[in-house]
Amino acid sequence: MATVNTVLGPIAPADLGITLMHEHILYGYPGWDGDRTIAPVNRKEIVANGVATLKQLKDEYGLNSYVDATPLDGGRMPEILKEVSEKSGVNIICSTGYYYEEEGSPTYWKFRGSLGDITEELYELFMTEVSKGIMDTGIKAGVLKVGSSKGEITDYEKLMFQTAARVSKETGVPIISHTQEGTMGPQQAELLIGAGANPKQIQIGHMSDNLDMQYQEDTFKHGVYVSWDRMGLQGLVGCPMDEQRYPVMIELIKKGYANQMMISHDCIISWLGRPLNLPEAALPLIANWHPSHLFKNIIPELKKGGVTDAQIDTIIRDNPRRLFAGE
Ligand SMILES: [Zn+2]
């Protein structure tokens, strides 16, 4: 029987309940750690922010589970996730895997790759993190994270996809992806399935960043799950506005795709490094970029458009369960 690796140990997919599929307790762009003299890691504050946010989601909206999509090169800290899960009572699932080449940290593996084949080394890393644990924490990763560039999947990224597919096939741990500016969704699905992954254990991410119906359907046709997981993040990093997204989501649901869709925000509760200096003009655009946006605003908007309670339950509860169960 399939199990889900949470940071507190294994649970059954049926125990996931209402799940946010792509969020971050903490995140830092590669290089953040070079600035630690000025901006040291404040573990207490990161834990407190995470616990406060997750508790609110649990108490007010019934959230049960939270997938932390922070890759190995995004400042991932499994022990902080563990503490937040213990103190909030929300299941947290930690990732293994790497971000897309341009904004990730590919130097180490590219250097090793220049000396010889790194296929087995990457496999050993991902496999160990999902089956034995991350470093000496005893915490197992519960999802494999991969990402591709705008308009292409680079050779470095391809190797990550192929390795994730191989580990997913052998372990039943699902794959979640990053797509850049609404590109390469169908190609990611093809690549992963071609490398042996079960389409029902693949979630193509950031599908909220491309509102073209053909692009959406070209991805769905591979039988994968897709995630509208940058909701509330608007007018920045290539994202459209939520007002433009709602009618497309509603149309897809009405076309019968509810059983392949998920919704999340890619929200970062604590940034590693210094606080962001956001331009004044950006503030209204991200006013709803918070993991409560789904419950406060998105679900009501979908319902106004005729989406039923049963369809919403499928999207926020049943699809995450089926992704982890491989159904
Ligand atoms: Zn993310």
Image (tube, rainbow, N blue to C red):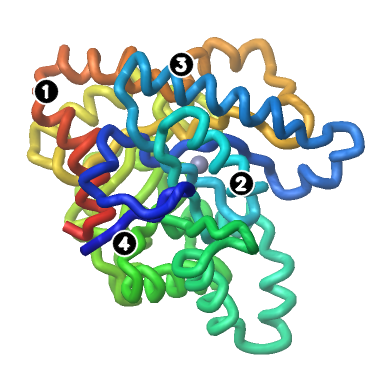
Query: Which tag, 2 or 3, sits closer to the chain's start?
Result: 2
Nearest to viewer (mark 2 / mark 3): 2
Q: How far apart are marks 1 and 3 (CA)?
A: 22 Å
The quarter holding residue 198 reads bottom left
In the rendered structure, find residue 79 and report the number of the disc placed on it. 2
Q: Looking at this view, is 173 or 64 the one in front?
A: 64
Which residue bears the numbered disc 3?
Answer: 288
Given the image, on which type of amino acid does mark 4 rest? Answer: Ala
Which residue bears the numbered disc 1?
Answer: 309
Given the image, on which type of amino acid does mark 2 rest? Answer: Glu
Q: Residues within 10 Å of mark 4 (few under 14, many from 20)?
A: many
Check the image and report above or below for 254 versus 193: above
Name the residue: 48% across, 60% down.
152
Given the image, on which type of amino acid does mark 3 rest? Answer: Asn
Q: Looking at this view, is 183 or 298 the one in front?
A: 298
Which residue bears the numbered disc 4?
Answer: 189
Expressed as whole percent of the image width and height from the top left, the position of residue 128 reads 52, 71
Nearest to viewer (mark 4 / mark 2): 2
Q: Residues within 10 Å of mark 2 (few under 14, many from 20)?
A: some
